Image (cartoon, rainbow, N blue to C red):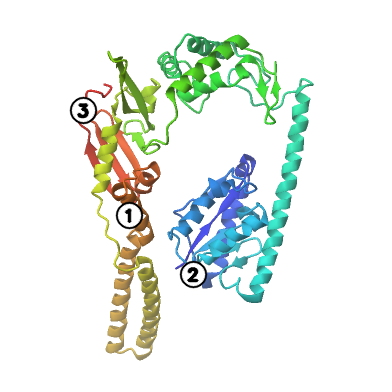
Amino acid sequence: MPKAYSYKRFSSDMQAKGDSLRRQTELAERYIERHPELDLELDKERDLTDSGFSAYKNAHLKRGALGVFVRAVEDGQIEEGSYLLVESIDRLYRSQPAEALPMLIQLVQSGVSVVTLNDEKVFSKKTLEGTDGTFVIMQSLVSMARAYDESLTKGRRVRAAWENKFKSIALGKQLTRRVPFWLTDDRQAIPEKAAIVKRIFAMYADGIGTYNIARILNGEKVPPPTRRTDHWAISSISKVLRTKNAMGTLITADGAEHNEYYPAVVTEELWLECQKLKRTSGNATGKSGTALLSGLCRCAECGSPARKAIKTGRIRKDGTRGRWETLVCSKATNNAGCPYIGISYKKILTAILDSIRMIEYVHPADDTLSEITNLRAYISHREDELTDAYEFSLKTKTVDARERYNRVAREVDELKESLLQLESKPSAATLAIQDRALNEIFRDNKPTNANLRKIIKMVQVDFRSREIFIETHLGNKLTETIEPSMNDAL
């Protein structure tokens, strides 16, 4: 039974609140119901919804669900013969036709049939063959060109509208109702919140870093800037210090600065002093690549992300100082609930690598996907025999006919059980992705964050018991205990 994947996209929050998602979902379900001859099964495992992604600049292909689907097709994780159902061609592409058409043809050549539900047009290997296929491609080009032109026109109108809004600022008009958290909707300072902003700048100017400012505010239970969080994060402190809003300046999307747009809560001198301190701090810190465990580890107690923390020792006689890295709960670093217990980053990484090194990989001797396809076809053939046997037993009403029907029925049941077992196995393509990542990590000595993410789904760290629980994408569950070291923060 071929799978149908329903792709939904809308580019604005307003569409998300409206009827767009329901409409696109129902169109896919109705198409499957109207075409029983295709024997399609709607896939419910992959979430192919791009909310707030524009197709005009291909954001949905770069960072969205459609891009993940296209890469899954390229990696062989989507079976040939599958269907991709979309409301219309412009849900897939609003970029220039010269860029969009090759992407569509690539999907089709990989064995995926694309259906536009508004007109039920099918783009498949069969429909793109010969003279008729040329006509279909020409029609698609016209549709893509129309969609691109609509997006281009809409973009120009939106840009012109915003330019007019930017000009109205000079007349004293308010650009939007969105304002910094220390102001009311009509740009009036809220005294108690403005006092928090002043205090943040004052503490930073006195040499207190963003990490310690967050700990102080959370320790005093100072209300966080928004209701979406229950604590002050380092990023929130940095944002307050970085933007010019606190000294009354608004910077619009065109890069223009509008002074005295907001009431100033700190002086320009204090703001500039803090910027100098931030530049000095940034130069001392330096930049590094993506940490190996970035985005993989979470605190087992509260579920918050675990982050790397840098510790330094006293200055030695030779002028150097010790430096080591630990992993801690992000809530603990912000003094927002969890106790501050650090575990050696290197030890956790070593334990994870040792664990996944033991994963047994057995490359399938045959093509699992092909075996499933063949078995489905054979079951269909045997079910036809079962129907014939049933009709023959009703017609003859003999013992031999009933026994033949029962025998075929048992065989069909056994075949279906075998099919379920095959379908429960990871696909050969998924196993191959894991195998390539394991080889690059251990054989080629390339333990990158990207390779670890291809194997590991999540790592839970119990900082109290010093246990880590590793879950892989293929269902492996591994446990390791980290021995204490002198450099751990207790």
* Residue 3, x across and y down, in percent: 47, 63
In three-dimensional space, the C-alpha distance between marks 3 and 2, rounded to whole angstroms, equals 58 Å
Q: Residue shown at 70%/31% (left/top)?
A: 254
Residue 298 occupies quadrant: top left
* Residue 268, x across and y down, in percent: 62, 11
In the image: residue 478, left or right of residue 96: left
* Type of the residue with mark 2: Asp
Q: Which mark is residue 484?
A: 3
Q: Nearer the viewer, residue 469 or 273?
A: 273
* Type of the residue with mark 3: Pro
Q: Residue shown at 32%/54% (left/top)?
A: 435
* Type of the residue with mark 1: Asp
Q: Secondary structure at mark 1?
A: helix
Crowding near the residue tagged with mark 3, few <14, some 14–19, many ≥20 C-alpha atoms within 10 Å: some
Of badges 3 and 2, the one in the foreground is 3
Crowding near the residue tagged with mark 1, few <14, some 14–19, many ≥20 C-alpha atoms within 10 Å: some
Marked residue nearer the N-terminal end (3 or 2): 2
In the image: residue 260, left or right of residue 226: right
Q: Establish if 455 lies above or below 271.
A: below
Q: As drawn, which residue projects farthest toward the right?
A: 171
* Residue 300, x across and y down, in percent: 31, 34
Q: Secondary structure at mark 3?
A: loop
In the image: residue 49, left or right of residue 173: left
Residue 48 visible somewhere in the drawing: no
Q: Which residue is mark 1?
A: 435
